[in-house]
Every structure is written in structure tokens, then in C-alpha cells.
């Protein structure tokens, strides 16, 4: 009969579906439960097949007890399932409660089985509806069956209340939808399992009604699995066609070749042909499972990989990882690998920030997870690649989980360095209508084990670059500080002379010639300030000063004249001795004026009233001119004598520490040298300048 063929198809298909669900993710709690919850439906299909195809008391006994086993086992499994979905709330207390429910189920099932074994011979007739008569003959079995109905109804009610109560949890929209789908499908399924042979077998065409409903719930299971995200479309296609087709081809060949042997076996053992056929189906399934696994791996896993295969792509890319030194390069490299080559639908790499402690996407800085959130805590505990199904069961806070759902994340891979979580990968599906296979996850885990080293190298490199930039910024600030301090220092001298000249003109009764002289001082110092600013602000450009022969005697006299007011105010004496009216050195007049004023004003600050400043100039030899500035002020300590020409070094409370540094730079640019000469009584600065050719004549 055609209905019998469809029953066999449903039975084989359900078995293949159970196999696919379990091995899709054998470590997943929900996968294991769902595969177990399909077993009662598979047994129900087999039960109906046995009841409508045979006329044997033994077959009827097997079928009815199989129905009791399937129907009774469904309810504790469904109840147990409610403690894991949508959240894992299993505790020691609930674990004891679930264990007690299983013991009750075993006890009630054993009682029903024993009661059925004690049936009188009167009901051993080959009537598939004899259980109705059996209820009248054996009241004990009837009472136990009523108890089973009450017990199953109680378990179903408790389970439904548990699922409805889970709505108070922090659930995602998809999880709430799944709960409604579970209740809408499993409640009618429970009725089908308990009363299937009562509801359909007595009816005209009742077997077709049963087949329709059983097929509907099988399809419903598939839709539920897709909604859960626990089985991909490719696995469904594999289940729908690969397994049943292979089983039936081999089965019919086997049955055709062994048809005569089956008849002989039935006559010898006195058993029904249907029992032999079902046994052959089960034997063939278990024999062919390894063949199916190989076929599955070759057909689906092989076709799902890109050029060179998943393994080869990761292997080749692992070699290329060694050349990456920046996180931006790593991001481009991984995007090319996972998006372009492996065609993974979603991918993100998040790395822990040294500053905030949060995990931030290296490609999208706005996408991040808290370093103290639930996701980070779970990854610290799992320390291996996890699928979102397993992680979501024990989730408590909903925000991060919702983000993962919105991003369609399937796998989460933590990255550890020295036992510290430094980041993690988020992966979507590995392709259209395809799931992550265990072998791929293993390959991926091996590849990702080398990524923390790359991240550490990139972070070290980028910190070094940042440090270099910071150092460059500090150096720029130092230059700017030196420039500003130099400006302040160098302008202070001409301003001091201008101030002293203006003060002299204001408090003294000067002749017209003296007024002109002091006015010229003010004008000259103003022009000199302009030149100073131009020279100091051109610190980054090569000095363009043109050094020409200058009469250093006139420059020194002019410098002393400019500070004469300060010398008189502090009651200091000047001793300027030269044996020539002109001593010619190669140096710019304004530069030498700036040098002389720096040394004279430093001496004035260092000396007390009544002390003497000694200045001298002479030809040192035919090629150099020597200038001496010696003051009787406080002696420079020996431990700081080597640092007096360093920028920003000063022993004065209000000094900038740039006067002598600038003086040394100006003298060296002119081809000369300045030094501090050891003396017990004076502070002596000696300047050596190149003499003009033929200047000694």
C-alpha cells in the first residue's frame, strides 16, 4: 500500500533528521534535546506502520508498547528542555526535581508494561483495536493508562507555565517567537503521541490523516530548527534527499536480492515479515552511517569551501600573518581572508583598549563591548570557540546578546595572551545556506591561535610609533620654547638699553648733542631688536648672516656705552684696555654687539656694587683675535662649569638659561669659539674670533 511506503519514508526521514540535528552540533545542549524530542515522533510513525501492515499479536504488542514508550518519554524530556531554553536555569534543586520526574516516568512506564504482559489469552487475537477491549478486561491497565494521561497532562501544564513564565526574563524578540512556536507545535504533538492510534486508526482513511499530521509536525520541526538557527538549509537538503534516497536505494536492492531469504527466515522463526523489514532498515542505517559521513564530507563540506579548500586558505594565510606589523594591515588582511576568500557572511575583530579596557572593533571604532560586560566574562570562562547557541543559554543581561543577534553572529572566538583576554573574533555564517562544520571550527581555532602574537607585535609597533610621535612633539615644543625664551632673552637687552636711555633723557638735563646721542641709541636698539627677531625666528633655516670684517674695539665701546647707565646705577667700575684703535675680526657687527651685551649684562647681574668688570681685546696670533670679559662677581661652581652653555641651564632665579647658549651658537657660526677660563678671583670668558686677513699691519 502507498500509505505504508509513506510511513516508511517518514520513519527513515525522522531518523535522518535526528542524526543531522545531533551531529550538526553534538556539543550543543539544545541540539541534543531537540534530537531526543523527535524520537517519540519517529517511534509513533513506526508504531502506526506496524499496526496497519501486520496481523500478528506479537507485532501488535511491540507496536503498542512502543507507542507507550514514545508517548510517555516525550513529557519528561519536554519538561527537562524547559530548564535550558531560553536560559539555562538548572540548579542542584531543579536537577533533583528533574531526576525525580524521570524516576516517576520510569516507574509508571514499567507498571504499564507489566500490566500489559499479564493480558489474558482472550485479547491475543489479531485485531489492531483490541486495546479497547483490553481496557474492559484489564481494569488495572486502564487505571494505569488514566494515571499516565493525568501525569502527562500535569507535566505538560507545568512545562507550558515554565515557558510562559520565561517571558518575564530579558529575552530577545526572536527568543519570544521561538517560545510561541514551541508551544504551538509541542502541545498538539503530545496529543498525537498519546492518542494517535485511538484517533486515526478507527477512521476511514484515518492512516492518511495521521500521515498528513505526522508530516506536518516533521516540517514544523524543521521550521522550528531554522528559527532557532540550530540547523542550516544545506543540512535540511541533506536530510531530505541524501539519507532517505541512499537508504531506499540500498534497501530495495537488498530486499530484492534477499526476498526469498526473508520468507525462509520468517517461516523458520515464526515472525512477521514486517519485523524483518524494520530490522533490515535499522541494520542498514547503522551500517551506512560511516558511508553517509564520508559522502556528506565530500559532497557538502568540499563544495562549501573556496579555491584550495578551507584548510589550504587558512594554512597559506597563517604564513602571511608573520609580515603584518600594524593593526590596520591586520584588519585589511583578515577582511580579505574571511570576506573575499572564505565568503563568511559576517566578521569582526575586537581588541581590548589599553585606556578604557573595552573591546573595540579595529575596523569600526564605534562598535564595542564593555571589558566588564557579560560577554567578556563568559569568554574568560569558556576559553575556546563557542557558538552563540551555547552561550545564550546561560545569558542573563540582554543588551549584549541582542547586539550579537542583530549582527547575525554564529561563532565567538576568544584570544588570549598570557592567560589574559586581549580580544575576540565574531563570525557569521560561513556562506549562503551553510553551517560551520566541526572540522572547520578546529581549523579556525588552530589558525586563530597565532593571532594574539600578531596583535601583540602590532600593538608594540604602534606604541613605538606613538612614542616617536610624542617624542617629536616634545622636541617641537622644546624648540618652540627655546625660540620663545630666546626672543624674550634677546629682546630684554635692547629693551633695557632703550629704557635706560629714555630714563636718562627724562631725569637729566642733557645738551642737544646728548639728546641726539641717546635718541640714536633708542633707534639703533629698536632696529637691532628687529634683526634679532628675524635671526631667532629663522632657527629652522640655515643662518644667512654674512660675517664681514668688523672693528671689535668700536663694537665693545658701543656696547659699554649702551649699558653705562646700568653700570653707574649699580656703582660698578669698567676697565677696558686695548693697545690699538682698531682690531679687525671677521664677524657681523650686530652679532658681536649681541654677544658683548649678553656677557656684560650677565656680569652686571653677578657683581655687587664697587666691583670691577675687566674687558680686553688683542690679536692672539696672526689668525685670531682674543676678547676677554672678566668680572669679580660670584664664582661659578666647578660642578656646573661644564653645563653653563647648555640650553635652559641657569643658576639665576629669574634667568632663562639661553643667554650663554645663544652666545656660543653665534660665535661658532662666525667661526670662533667661546670658553670659560679657570680663575680663583674672577669669572673669565674668553672669545676667539678669526682675524681679518692682513689686519695686523
Image: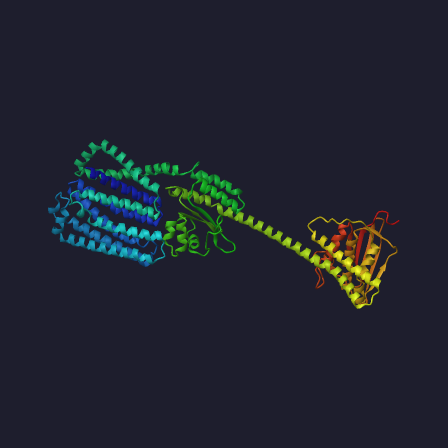
The residue sitting at the left extreme is 122
Whether residue 412 appears in this view of the structure is yes
Q: Is residue 185 shown left or right of residue 267?
A: right
Give the percent coordinates (x, y) of residue 125: 12, 44
Q: Is residue 223 shown left or right of residue 500?
A: left
The colour scheme is rainbow
Closer to the camera in the image, 607 or 49: 607
Closer to the camera in the image, 580 or 418: 580
Q: Where 255 sits versus 473, above or below?
A: above
Give the percent coordinates (x, y) of residue 610: 81, 67
Q: Where 604 sits versus 144, above or below?
A: below
Q: How many marks?
A: 0
Q: Is residue 658 shown left or right of residue 406?
A: right
Whether residue 606 appears in this view of the structure is no
For the N terminus, which image quadrant?
top left
| Rendered residue at 48%/44% (across/down) | 334
Q: Where 28 sits versus 270, above or below?
A: below
Give the percent coordinates (x, y) of residue 570: 79, 67
The residue sitting at the front extreme is 512
Give the percent coordinates (x, y) of residue 182: 29, 51
| Rendered residue at 35%/48% (across/down) | 28
Amino acid at each position: 500500500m502507498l500509505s505504508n511506503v509513506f510511513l516508511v519514508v517518514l520513519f527513515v526521514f525522522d531518523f535522518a533528521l535526528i542524526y543531522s540535528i545531533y551531529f550538526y552540533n553534538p556539543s550543543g545542549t539544545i541540539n541534543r534535546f531537540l534530537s531526543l524530542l523527535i524520537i517519540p515522533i519517529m517511534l509513533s510513525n513506526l508504531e502506526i506502520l506496524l499496526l496497519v501492515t501486520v496481523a500478528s499479536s506479537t507485532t501488535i504488542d511491540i507496536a503498542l508498547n512502543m507507542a507507550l514508550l514514545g508517548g510517555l518519554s516525550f513529557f519528561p524530556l519536554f519538561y527537562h528542555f524547559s530548564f535550558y531554553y531560553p536560559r539555562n536555569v538548572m540548579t542542584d534543586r531543579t536537577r533533583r526535581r528533574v531526576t525525580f520526574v524521570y524516576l516517576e516516568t520510569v516507574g509508571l512506564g514499567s507498571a504499564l508494561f507489566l500490566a500489559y504482559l499479564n493480558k489474558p489469552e482472550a485479547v491475543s487475537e489479531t485485531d489492531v483495536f483490541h486495546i479497547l477491549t483490553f481496557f474492559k478486561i484489564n481494569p488495572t491497565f486502564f487505571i494505569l493508562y488514566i494515571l499516565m494521561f493525568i501525569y502527562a497532562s500535569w507535566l505538560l501544564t507545568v512545562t507550558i507555565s515554565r515557558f510562559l513564565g520565561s517571558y518575564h526574563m530579558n529575552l530577545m524578540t526572536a527568543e519570544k517567537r521561538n517560545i510561541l512556536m514551541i508551544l504551538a507545535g509541542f502541545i498538539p504533538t503530545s496529543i498525537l503521541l498519546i492518542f494517535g492510534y485511538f484517533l486515526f486508526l478507527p477512521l476511514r482513511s484515518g492512516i492518511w490523516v495521521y500521515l498528513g499530521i505526522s508530516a506536518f509536525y516533521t516540517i514544523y520541526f524543521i521550521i522550528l530548527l531554522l528559527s532557532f538557527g540550530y540547523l542550516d538549509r544545506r543540512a535540511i537538503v541533506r536530510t531530505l534527499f541524501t539519507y532517505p534516497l541512499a537508504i531506499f536505494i540500498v534497501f530495495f536492492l537488498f530486499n530484492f536480492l534477499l526476498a526469498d531469504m526473508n520468507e525462509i527466515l520468517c517461516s523458520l522463526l515464526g515472525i512477521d515479515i514486517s519485523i524483518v523489514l524494520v530490522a533490515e532498515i535499522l541494520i542498514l542505517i547503522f551500517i551506512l552511517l560511516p558511508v553517509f559521513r564520508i559522502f556528506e564530507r565530500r559532497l557538502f563540506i568540499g563544495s562549501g569551501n573556496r579555491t584550495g579548500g578551507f584548510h589550504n586558505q587558512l594554512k597559506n594565510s597563517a604564513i602571511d600573518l608573520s609580515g603584518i606589523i600594524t593593526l590596520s594591515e591586520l584588519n585589511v588582511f583578515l577582511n580579505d581572508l574571511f570576506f573575499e576568500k572564505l565568503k563568511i557572511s559576517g566578521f569582526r575583530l575586537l581588541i581590548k583598549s589599553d585606556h578604557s579596557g573595552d573591546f573595540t572593533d579595529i575596523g569600526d571604532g564605534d562598535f564595542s563591548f564593555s571589558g566588564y560586560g557579560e560577554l567578556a566574562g563568559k569568554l574568560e570562562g569558556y576559553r575556546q570557540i563557542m557558538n552563540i547557541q551555547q552561550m545564550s543559554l546561560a545569558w542573563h543581561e540582554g543588551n549584549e546578546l541582542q547586539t550579537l543577534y542583530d549582527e547575525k553572529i554564529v561563532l565567538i572566538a576568544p584570544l588570549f595572551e598570557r592567560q589574559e583576554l586581549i580580544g575576540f573574533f565574531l563570525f557569521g555564517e560561513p556562506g549562503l545556506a551553510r553551517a560551520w562544520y566541526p572540522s572547520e571550527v578546529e581549523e579556525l581555532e588552530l589558525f586563530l591561535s597565532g593571532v594574539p602574537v600578531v596583535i601583540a607585535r602590532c600593538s608594540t609597533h604602534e606604541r613605538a610609533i606613538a612614542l616617536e610621535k610624542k617624542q617629536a612633539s616634545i622636541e617641537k615644543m622644546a624648540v618652540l620654547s627655546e625660540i620663545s625664551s630666546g626672543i624674550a632673552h634677546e629682546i630684554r637687552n635692547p629693551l633695557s638699553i632703550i629704557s635706560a636711555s629714555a630714563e636718562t633723557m627724562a631725569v637729566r638735563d642733557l645738551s642737544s648733542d646728548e639728546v641726539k646721542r641717546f635718541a640714536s641709541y633708542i633707534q639703533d636698539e629698536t632696529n637691532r631688536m628687529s634683526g634679532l627677531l628675524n635671526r631667532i625666528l629663522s632657527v629652522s633655516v640655515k643662518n644667512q648672516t654674512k660675517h664681514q670684517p668688523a672693528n671689535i674695539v668700536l663694537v665693545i665701546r658701543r656696547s659699554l656705552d649702551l649699558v653705562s647707565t646700568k653700570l653707574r646705577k649699580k656703582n660698578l667700575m669698567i676697565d677696558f684696555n686695548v693697545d690699538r684703535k682698531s682690531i679687525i675680526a671677521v664677524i657681523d657687527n650686530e652679532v658681536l654687539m649681541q654677544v658683548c651685551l649678553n656677557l656684560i649684562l650677565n656680569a652686571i647681574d653677578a657683581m655687587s656694587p664697587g666691583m670691577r668688570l675687566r674687558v680686553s681685546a688683542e690679536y692672539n696670533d696672526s689668525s685670531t683675535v682674543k676678547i676677554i670679559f672678566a668680572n669679580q662677581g660670584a664664582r661659578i661652581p666647578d660642578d656646573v662649569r661644564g653645563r653653563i652653555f647648555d640650553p635652559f641651564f641657569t643658576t639665576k632665579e629669574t634667568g632663562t638659561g639661553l643667554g650663554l647658549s645663544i652666545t656660543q651658537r653665534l660665535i661658532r657660526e662666525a667661526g670662533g669659539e667661546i670658553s670659560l677660563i679657570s680663575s680663583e678671583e674672577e669669572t673669565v670668558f674668553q672669545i676667539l674670533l678669526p682675524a681679518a686677513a692682513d689686519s695686523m699691519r
